[in-house]
Image: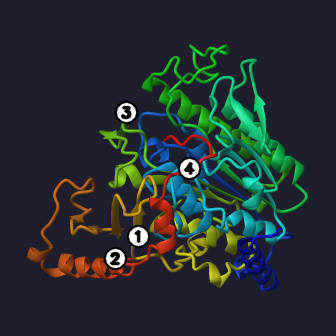
């Protein structure tokens, strides 16, 4: 029997499909709709990419995408994986629809739904962590899925356990999980090369446990546990391997003649693990996953689309994780149903080298386990930051929030900015729906994959 929620979503999507419009004028010359690949690294902060000023790791493929595309300096996401995934996939701030860690509300509409409705082949490969139902990826709009931490939580690296379209697959002959998932990504774009495709690729690298990769000198193909050979020194090898897998996928697109009609976007899902200290622009930079400062929310974002995105550009506009859904939909030429009431705004104009309509602030509501109240909540501009509890920071002078300012003592531009951010924050005072808050406060659901960071 079709549920009322499914019926409402179907109606929304049908209405959106009926209102589908042509691509914007800058996209009109394409023979078919553009392909979109959205890649997200796990626990990978802004400081880890060489093109951003990182000095500890080798990221040649990402650096090449940045040099021939666009690099963004102010992309902020949630400080933990599931909250970011929920925002990214729905275009809605967590305050409105985040229930609990390791779960996406089954009633949610995702970018998978919207692009599938627009005629795209849709696929997802990598880390799931959004609920254990075998058909959930398909329920959320993906034709095909190849995932880790879907129906269970086995090892993810050496001799991994994965799920292909919900069916469990175990590997015991030295296979490496990230390579298997990349094999799927390469195969997906190959099989669907004759039609528009959307591939969402939330990678399992570079999340702890920090273990050797097949390119490491101490790689053990017989390892069958996430508890062996754990050492933060392996983060460098894991970063290099992650970058290598991205290069492998890009090379396949080149081989297939698809690069000029494919938008590739890469970002991190939150800041680097706190045990990782990197060199960044000549100084030590400690990861801050789980924290509300830039160390936890500031992530790399690189976009590449030959012939569409001007090469070598650096963009300093604020980008939030809720902005990807409307951007992808605009690229695909499909409208976002107004009834979804998303919080994101498209940055496609910026990608195409235009001014666009940049945000003047972004909002963050974070509760690791769903609430009912936030662990922290703030509004952020390019220069300042205001928390719900009244703490106010000048990010130009204090980027890691060590010296809160007294709003009562402010004057001039700082006082004006504090007032403006307070107005922005006030919009969300009662934004959390009562039914969502109640779910977040309820005993945690059973029957889903074990939730861990």
Residue 141: percent from left, percent from top: 76, 62
Name the residue at the left extreme.
409
Q: Which residue is mark 1?
A: 363
**Along the polypeptide, which appears first: circle 4 or circle 1?**
4
Q: Nearer the viewer, residue 196 or 322?
A: 322
Q: What's the CA distance linking mark 3 and mark 2?
A: 32 Å
Disc 1 secondary structure class: strand
Q: Which mark is residue 275?
A: 3
Res 183 → quadrant: top right
Q: Is residue 11 left or right of residue 190?
A: left
Residue 206: percent from left, percent from top: 54, 37
CB within 8 Å, label 1 to label 2: yes
CB within 8 Å, label 3 to label 1: no
Q: Quadrant of the N terminus?
A: bottom right
Q: Which mark is residue 425?
A: 2
Q: Residues within 10 Å of mark 3 (few under 14, many from 20)?
A: few
Q: Is residue 50 left or right of residue 222?
A: left
Q: Residues within 10 Å of mark 2 (few under 14, many from 20)?
A: many
In the rendered view, tell whether residue 133 sits above or below residue 194. Answer: above
Q: Nearer the viewer, mark 2 or mark 4?
A: 4
In the rendered view, tell whether residue 1 sits above or below residue 49. Answer: below
In the rendered view, tell whether residue 162 sits above or below residue 200. Answer: above
**Along the polypeptide, which appears first: circle 3 or circle 4?**
4
Which residue is rendered at x = 83% and y = 43% of the image?
187
**Along the polypeptide, which appears first: circle 1 or circle 2?**
1
Q: What's the CA distance linking mark 4 and mark 1?
A: 22 Å
């Amino acid at each position: 029997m079709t549920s009322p929620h499914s019926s409402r979503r179907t109606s929304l999507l049908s209405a959106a499909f009926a209102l589908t419009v042509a691509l914007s004028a800058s996209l009109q010359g394409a023979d078919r709709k553009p392909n979109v690949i959205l890649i997200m690294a796990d626990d990978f902060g802004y400081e880890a990419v060489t093109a951003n000023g990182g000095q500890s790791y080798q990221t040649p493929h990402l650096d090449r995408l940045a040099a021939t595309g666009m690099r963004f300096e102010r992309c902020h996401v949630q400080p933990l994986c599931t909250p970011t995934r929920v925002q990214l996939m729905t275009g809605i701030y967590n305050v409105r629809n985040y229930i609990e860690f390791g779960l996406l509300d089954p009633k949610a509409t995702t970018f998978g739904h919207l692009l599938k409705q627009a005629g795209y082949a849709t696929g997802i490969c990598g880390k799931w962590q959004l609920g254990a139902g075998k058909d959930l990826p398909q329920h959320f709009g993906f034709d095909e899925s190849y995932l880790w931490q879907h129906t269970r939580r086995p090892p993810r690296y050496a001799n991994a356990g994965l799920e292909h379209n919900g069916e469990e697959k175990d590997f015991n002959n030295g296979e490496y999980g990230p390579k298997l998932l990349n094999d799927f990504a390469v195969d997906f774009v190959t099989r669907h090369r004759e039609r528009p495709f959307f591939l969402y690729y939330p990678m399992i690298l570079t999340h702890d446990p920090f273990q050797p990769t097949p390119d490491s000198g101490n790689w053990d193909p017989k390892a069958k546990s996430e508890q062996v050979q754990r050492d933060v020194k392996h983060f460098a090898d894991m970063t290099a391997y992650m970058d290598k897998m991205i290069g492998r996928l890009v090379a396949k697109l080149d081989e297939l003649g698809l690069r000029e009609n494919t938008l590739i976007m890469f970002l991190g899902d939150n800041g680097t693990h706190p045990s990782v200290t990197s060199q960044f622009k000549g100084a030590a930079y400690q990861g801050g996953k789980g924290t509300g400062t830039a160390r936890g929310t500031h992530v790399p974002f690189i976009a590449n689309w030959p012939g569409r995105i001007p090469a070598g550009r650096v963009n300093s506009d604020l980008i939030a994780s809720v902005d990807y859904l409307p951007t992808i939909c605009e690229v695909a030429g499909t409208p976002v149903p107004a009834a979804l009431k998303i919080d994101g705004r498209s940055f496609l104009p910026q990608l195409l080298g235009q001014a666009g309509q940049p945000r003047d602030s972004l909002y963050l509501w974070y509760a690791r386990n769903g609430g009912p109240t936030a662990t922290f909540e703030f509004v952020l501009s390019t220069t300042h930051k205001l928390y719900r509890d009244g703490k106010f920071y000048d990010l130009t002078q204090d980027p890691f929030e060590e010296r809160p300012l007294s709003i009562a003592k402010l004057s001039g531009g700082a006082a004006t900015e504090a007032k403006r951010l307070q107005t922005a924050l006030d919009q969300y005072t009662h934004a959390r729906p009562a039914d969502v808050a109640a779910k977040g406060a309820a005993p945690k659901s059973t029957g889903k994959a074990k939730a861990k960071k």
